[in-house]
Image (cartoon, rainbow, N blue to C red):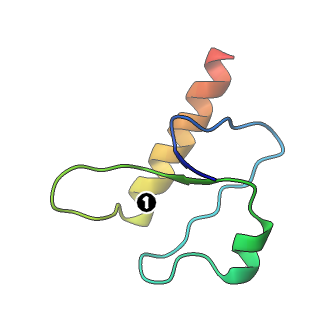
Amino acid sequence: TDLNFRQATYRPPLALLFGNERTGLSTELQDAVNEFVHIPIQGRASSLNLGAAVAVMTYQVQLQHRLA
């Protein structure tokens, strides 16, 4: 499943895995994943750097837990 990161449900136990821009996650890690999420961005850039992606995802997880 490939969801917009805002549509996913983040429940414990939870592990966030971040692939690199060029090759993504290894096949072994992809096989272990329950859901794939993406962070849509606008403009000319095609991806966020790792620090920005981690910040966006951790914020979303915390927001969802606060609202639950």
Which residue sits at x=64%, y=53%?
Answer: 1
Where is residue 64 shown, x and y percent of the image?
61, 26
Q: Residues within 10 Å of mark 1 (few under 14, many from 20)?
A: few
Above or below, 37 against 24 in this view is above
Q: Quadrant of the C terminus?
A: top right
Name the outermost residue toward the front. 1
Q: Position of residue 32 (x, y in %)?
A: 79, 67
Residue furthest to the top in view is: 67
Residue 12 x/y as whole percent: 81, 40
In the image as oriented, which residue stretches furthest toward the right?
13
Q: Total marks drawn?
A: 1
Task: Residue 16: name its quadrant.
Answer: bottom right
Q: Label 1, secondary structure: give it.
A: helix
- Check disc 1 and report the residue beneath it: 51
Determine the residue positioned at 76% across, 48% down. Answer: 14
22 over 45 or under it: above or below: below
The residue nearer to you, when weighing 2 against 39, is 2
The kind of residue tagged 1 is Gly
Which residue occupies the foreground of this view, 66 or 34? 34
Instruction: Look at 16% across and 53% down and name the residue there.
Output: 43
Left or right, 51 with respect to 37, comes to: left
Nearest the viewer among 55 and 9 is 9
* Residue appearing at x 15%, y 61% in the figure: 44
On the rendered structure, is 20 left or right of 15?
left
Q: Residue 51 location in percent, x, y?
A: 43, 60
Q: In this orientation, which residue lies closer to the viewer: 19 or 58?
A: 19
